[in-house]
Amino acid sequence: MMNDPLIKMDHVYKIYEVRKLLTKNYIVAVEDFNLSIEYENPSIVTLAGESGCGKTTVARMILGLIEPTRGVIYYRGKDLRSLKGMDLVMFRRDVQAVFQDPYASFNPLHRIETILVTPIKKLGIASSDREAIEIAERSLEEVGLNPSAIIGKYPRQLSGGERQRVMIARALSLNPKLIVADEPVSMLDASIRANILNLIKDLKDRRNISFVYITHDLSTAYYISDEIIIMYRGSIVERGDAKKVLLEPLHPYTKILIESIPIPDPTKRKIVRGTWLYEDATSSIISTGCKFYPRCPVRMEKCLSKHPPLIRINDREVACYLYGSEKR
């Protein structure tokens, strides 16, 4: 239905079973995750946090590459797991991906023309080979590449920035409504990184495309995002307007992330105290309390007994007992 969100994640969990000799353990990669991407009103939603916090797992679930253990992901009101036939084709058109390493995503034996034209034809975007090539060429032009100079080359013959633009062009050729961009600029030089970020912002405004932007770099998150979701060990600890969250963070973990951003001028660098880096033995056994307890500089006894829920503070949400009616 057109009134339904394009993508809705409803209390989603992803739990992995780990077997070791005769024992069986479980890793909660994503816990009670909620997200809504509207069909209209495009936005850039950033998932941020350190490596292993669950960002990429969320991305893979949105793309349908893995299924949630619990909870439901909806595409236009339909359970993503139930999509078949034309519904599945429409999902593949509407939801596309841009990965960190485009070279690993391309067949090195195929020229750029084949890489671009194949999904256009398979998903029924073009009715002829000529039309498919024209769409591919327009997409290359849209990302700032010269089709005649690029389309006959192999991926290995392109620079990192060119390969990333080709991957974006491949997504654009399918007229998507959402692009999941997983660390799309982390392997690029600073100047090229800025160009790709500007391209993403331009595509949101000009093509009405939403983005789920995944990063550990809060500097790029501040520049590009409308909304930001801060994750820690699979859980959302803070979410809201990106500028407000990053300029006036509430959660202790968000504050630590911001304090850790490198500053080029050594005379202006903040001294980040090391107490928060310490993790004691409780870090591996906490199951009911706050996951950030072992590293938190303002932890309380209550934090060990119950995981803090996400509560609304004005126009954002935060999971911390320092705030709300349950604060001490």
Image: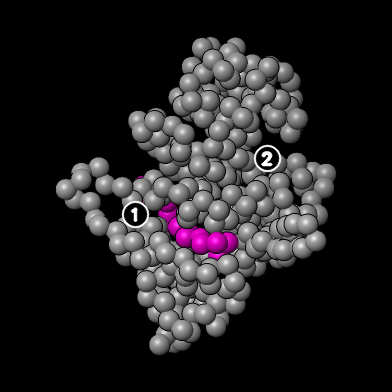
Q: Residue at x 69, y 54 (%)?
A: 75
Quarter of the image containing the C terminus? bottom left
For residue 46, above or below residue 319: above
For residue 292, above or below residue 193: below
For residue 38, above or below residue 322: above
* Residue 283 inside the magenta-drawn segment: no
For residue 192, above or below residue 203: above
Q: Give the alpha-carbon distance from disc 2 to disc 1, as whole Å.
A: 38 Å
Q: Is residue 1 visible?
A: no
Q: Is residue 247 left or right of residue 3?
A: left
Viewer-closest of 298 and 225? 298
Q: Which residue is mark 1?
A: 260
**Label 1 residue SS:** loop
What kind of residue is marked 2?
Answer: Arg
Residue 225 point in image, percent of width and height? 42, 51
Q: Which residue is mark 2?
A: 93
Query: Which image quarter: residue 106?
Result: top right
Q: Could you tell which of marks 2 and 1 lies nearer the N-terminus?
A: 2
